[in-house]
Amino acid sequence: MSEHGKTDGKKPIGTRVRDWFNGGDPDGRAKIRTWVTGEDGQWRGYTHSMGRYVTWLMIIACFLYPFTRGIGSILALIVAIFLMGGRAMIERQVRRDVSDLEEAKRQYGLTRNPEYLRFMTLRAEGLLEDNKILTPDSRRLLEGYVQWAQERQERQDKKRAKKARKEEQKAQRGTSARDIDDSEEPDQSDDGATAVGENKSADGS
């Protein structure tokens, strides 16, 4: 008999049952909970896993089999397949959208085209509003895209406003300079009239 078997034999029955329930280690309950829920804390995608619901539907299918002659089990399994397929489709779409957002971010860095910022804001906000099974990490990622795009948009708006103010001030200075030049220019008609008067007086003399 192995040392592990000898050690287990010396333990009380209650301790051995508890160890068996725990899977033989302190993390046994967490492992059982992971198996039941399908969530182990690791990254599985941008959307919540359907493993918990699929597991319970499988248990329900097993329970219904003897009472419904398999019909109830088939229905439960169809629902499970529908959940897994729906989640796979949504996950694929979110992956494409995140890839588009990352490409738009890269293109903005190359071109400084504000259209990319508007695209990022609309696409990320649309995903956050429409998709209800996004994980918290995915929501934080999309919110980060929105914040990044809005910050750059605000900077561009400030630059445009500052440029417009400078052009307006420049135009006002140009108008003031023209007004000053016009006011300092001598009146040629008055000079002409004065010269004519002097000539007439000279002829009379």
Image (spheres, rainbow, N blue to C red):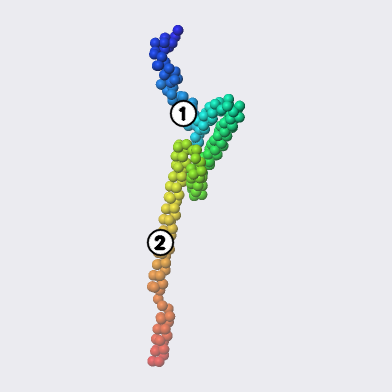
Q: Is residue 110 visible?
A: no
* Marks 2 and 1 in Cβ contact (< 8 Å): no
Q: Nearer the viewer, residue 17 or 130?
A: 17
Q: CA distance from mark 2 to mark 1?
A: 63 Å
Q: Nearer the viewer, residue 173 or 127?
A: 127
Q: Nearer the viewer, residue 165 or 184?
A: 165
Q: Is residue 21 visible?
A: yes
Residue 172: x percent and y percent? 41, 64
Which part of the image, by quadrant, shows the C terminus? Answer: bottom left
Residue 181: x percent and y percent? 40, 70
| Amino acid at pointer 2 | Gln
Q: Residues within 10 Å of mark 1 (few under 14, many from 20)?
A: few
- The furthest residue to the front: 67
**Badge count:** 2
- The furthest residue to the top: 1
Name the residue at 56% across, 36% down: 86
Q: Residues within 10 Å of mark 2 (few under 14, many from 20)?
A: few
| Amino acid at pointer 1 | Asp
The label shown at residue 62 is none
Which residue in the protein does label 2 denote? 169
Q: Is residue 161 above or below residue 96?
A: below
Which part of the image, by quadrant, shows the N terminus? Answer: top left
Q: Is residue 165 above or below residue 1?
A: below
Residue 142: x percent and y percent? 47, 41
Q: State the image quarter where residue 199 is shown.
A: bottom left
The label shown at residue 40 is 1
Secondary structure type for disc 1? loop
Name the residue at 54% across, 38% down: 90
Residue 188 falls left or right of residue 100: left
Indicate which disc, 2 or 1, sits on the residue closer to the N terminus.
Answer: 1
Residue 84: x percent and y percent? 55, 33
Name the residue at 45% across, 30% down: 41
